[in-house]
Amino acid sequence: AAILTSIEVNKDKILYSFRDKIVLLELNGKKLKIIDTIFNISGRISIDRSGRFWVCSPKLGAICFDNPNRDLSNPKIYLPGKKTTYMFEDRQGTFWFCTLDDGIYGLPHNTPISYYKKDGLLSENLSAVIRDDKGRILFGDDEGNLNILQDGKHTIHQLESIDGYNRILSILPIAPDYYYVLTDEAVFAVTASGETTPLGFGGSPKVLLKQDNLIWCGTSARLFTLDLKTQQIQERFEQRITALGTDSENLIWAGGIDGLYTSADGFKKNWGHTFPSLKSRIIAIQNGGANTLWVATPEADLLKVKVAGGQVISVQPANDFLPKPVHNIHAIFRENSGQLWLSTNQGVIGVNPTTWDLIKYNHNDGLANDDVRAIYVYQDTLWAATTTGLTRMLLNTDASIAGFSTLITGIRYQQNDTIQQIHLPTETGENRTTTLPGEASLVEVDFAGLNYRSRGNLWFDCLITEVLPPLQWLTTDNLLTWIGSGFKGKTDTARIYKSSLDFGVHMPPGKYKLQVTACTQNGIRSPLPGEWAVVMPTPWFKTFWFWLGIWMLTGYGVYRFFRTQLKLRDMNALVAQLRLIALQAQINPHFIGNSINAIQRFFYPPSPTRASIYNATFTQLLRKTLDYSEQTFIPFSEEVAYHKDYLELAQLRYGDTHFEYTISGADTIPGDLAFPALFLQPILENATIHGNATDSISSISIAYHQDGDYIYCTITDNGPGIHAKQHDQNRGVGKKHRSKGIRMLQNKAAVLNQLFDLDLQLSVCDLQKTDPLSTGTKVTVSFNTSRINHALARQKILDKQQKSVIKEYNKHA
């Protein structure tokens, strides 16, 4: 008739929960047998992984039946008086309890245990802790109370005090059941039964150290030794001593308020003068093994001091090697394995001297307080004396905690001066990407590790991979980064000791894939990392497509510009070609006119024979002139032959007794070398007409020579010279004449240089300027032969363009 509220089966046991009782039955074959019944208990039944029954009672709390028989004997009540409705056990062995009126409670596996005033302490401000050979835990407080824990029993011995404040600084086991306890006021010999005897050290004691049969005691004024056999006290050093330690050679090292001393030289030398980082108040000294001391000071924090034979060899600040600096050290404890434990005002910090890895425990891990004054580690248990109680913590790592997950929980950013937050789903899904608004700034990604034993005391390894964003937000930087990474995405790693990743004030546009792995202080990594992708959009004017359009328009504009420039250049070249043709055409009639005037001289007086020879030679030369005038370049050998024919005409005209000429150097120049057609003809014409000598035979010389890539042609006459000719014309002597041939030749040189870049140079020199006793004119022509081949190719193109223009003109005419 009873109303059943819950039922659970554990192998052959069945537990029923009714409104007013619970009943345990056992299945034996096919029969059920009632084993036990408890009245006034009811609630929801659960079974943990070890097979124990739990009853969550809304009246009594969570009841665990903890015994190997799995019956209802030995009940333990957790959360007494809480209205507990449900419990479950996670993969790390943590029990979670739901209550009706007080939220959710967690009971971690191997949780730290702390002792407070409510547990029997007279003062919670603890200052020393140690373990003796019998397994007793001894710890002292600031009121001179020596606490002893043994087999769950707590005993307190109160030491004498003048003003009631007598802080215990250290506890030193001397023999079984016998200790030396150092306080602010004195050093006491204390037995396990509580008998106390003060020792006769003068001054205010600061530190104790046992070495064989000697007890070293540092006080506010001196360093003493006590012989345990003779009980004789001897003064060793007059100095305030704050720390004592031994090295691997069993030498004593004493730290004072201004440096470090050693027994090797009778404490005479202060090593702080040699190593400035030691010239400070020494807080603690610990033997580091293998000629090593660990020294703590307020200024330099933890120092690794190498020593040998009582000499300090080197001093290294540990913070130079640690991933995070450690400050405010109160005490140092070293395990036999070499592991260091530091008590600080930020918790207990473990240092591996080989790898410099850090382990940190604070109130998140169960310490009574972060301000830890002393520590002691034995096997896998750490005892910490804090300012609010004593904490026992297990250091062993349980493989069961390796299954915890890492989650990326949210994204925070600022938009229009307002903080926005996005809560991310924790369940697995295909679309694990968040696109932020383009104006988002101060972006942070939050994450967490589901390791409840660490209580949030985790660090995180973040793998950030920058990949290509959606195409509409692609930037040039995204593309270059993608290509530069070998089409795999640029990756970066960061170790973060907080639970968020900060992208700075302005997050660069792109897509960032995040993989976050939580790690415990013991180095256990989460096998289930959190993964998410964040996309920061790009403004349209910064996208790759916008700049691609700009580049394409710019490229098209540059292309059009150069096409136009090319056409203009071709047009200018064609115009120059036509100008060259026009100049050639001007030279022809000029030459013909001068030749006809010369023929007229053979009629007065008549000279038919010379006129006939002249006429034949002139006809031959005229054909060449008409032929060459249509060409821009002719072979050098034809140019030289043309010059000879022209000078032969001049000799026929003036006679052998009045005119002579010479040509030299022509054989040193290749005959097939292209030479500007008829370029020298106007010079020869000026030399034969205007360069005649007045009182001697007129002479013209042509000299060719080659110097490197340049051809030089020099034409020299012995006439009156340019200066004298102009002077006579200015005085009105003779007919005023301006040489059109030279002017046309200069124009022709300019056009040839414009078309073919020959570096064609033309210079005219009056010889009387350089030598007053000389008369005549020297004209020098030079050009670069290395550019002839290019000029010939260019000429072919110009000829085709010229024909094309003429054809187009005839078509529209």
Image (cartoon, rainbow, N blue to C red):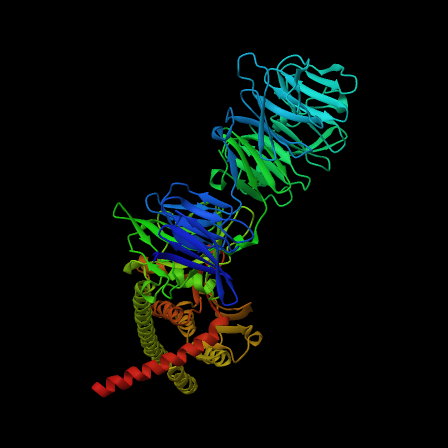
Relative horizontal placement of residue 138, taking residue 49 as reference (left or right): right
Residue lying at 32% horizontally and 84% vertically, measured from the top left: 803
Position of 71 with respect to 205 (left or right) is left
**Can residue 385 be seen by looking at this rendering?**
yes
Q: Quadrant of the N terminus?
A: bottom left
Total labels drawn: 0
Q: Position of residue 240 (x, y in %)?
A: 64, 17
Q: Quadrant of the C terminus?
A: bottom left
Residue at the right extreme, as displayed: 230
Q: Nearer the viewer, residue 627 or 67?
A: 67
Left or right: 446 as drawn, with respect to 362: left
In the rendered view, tell whether residue 18 sits above or below residue 186. below
From the viewer's perspective, tell me whether residue 391 is left or right of residue 355: left
Residue 216: image quadrant is: top right
Residue at left offset 31%, top offset 69% = 556
Q: Is residue 716 above or below residue 635?
A: above
Instruction: Locate residue 497, reporting x and y percent.
Output: 47, 45
Mark yes or no: residue 502 visible. Answer: no
